[in-house]
Image: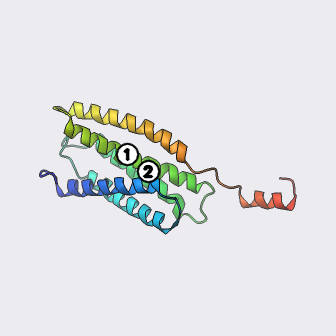
Amino acid sequence: MIAHLTPAGAIHAVLALLCLAAGFIQFLRPKRGAGHRARGYFYVYAMLVSDAATLLVYRFTGHFNAFHVAAIVNFTLIVLAIVPLLRTPRPSNWRRTHYNFIAWSYASPVSAGITNIAARLLPVTTREQVALIALAASLVTMMIAYILIRKYRPSSEAPIVSTALAGQSGAPS
């Protein structure tokens, strides 16, 4: 690994890479069953730890910066994606809510990974150039994510039970 990484930086890097892989597999695989849940739990726990580790890394600017804000936003997206799954009874739109928040939480590490790779491969000499790379990577990632998230979102939920029963009984609704 990179010699100058702190333990928090190494934890963040390893878990972020594993989350990228797990998220990509989740995208390709069916969205039901024990395998989906297991990969999902791994993604959620690993991403929460990775985001927390991000908050401990200050080598880039020496103080709180936009990358820390992004980690807090991503942490919030993960929590919002999980809350509908934990509620009993689940809200009628739980699948779409879960999908939207978890999908956007995946766009964040993709953008960060592109930024990291570009900042290491391009002849970057200032923090402002890194910020410009981050902005460009984020904009491109968010545009692509917007298209893919809309394309693959779950269909609208089935009608609520009372409406379905009213339709079966012949009663006007």
The location of residue 116, given as percent across then percent down, is 25, 42
Q: Which residue is mark 1?
A: 108
Which of 3/66 is in front?
3
Which of 26/81 is in front?
26
The location of residue 76, given as percent across then percent down, is 42, 51
Sequence-first tag of 2 and 1 = 2
Which of 52/27 is in front?
27
Residue type pointed to by label 1:
Ser
The residue positioned 30% from the left and 36% from the top of the image is: 134
Q: Quadrant of the N terminus?
A: bottom left
Q: Which residue is mark 2?
A: 77
The location of residue 172, given as percent across then percent down, is 86, 53
Q: Nearer the viewer, mark 2 or mark 1?
A: 1
Q: Is residue 160 visible?
A: yes
Q: Is residue 65 visible?
A: no
Say what secondary structure mark 2 lies in: helix
The residue positioned 35% from the left and 52% from the top of the image is: 20
Residue 8 appears left or right of 26 = left
Residue 146 appears left or right of 163 = left
The local crowd at label 1, few if under 14, some if 14 to 19, many if 20 or more residues have their Cα within 10 Å, is many
The location of residue 87, given as percent across then percent down, is 55, 63
The residue positioned 24% from the left and 53% from the top of the image is: 56
Which of 119/160 is in front?
119
Outermost residue toward the bottom in this view: 34
Find out whether the residues at labels 2 and 1 contact each other: C-beta distance under 8 Å: yes
Q: How many marks?
A: 2
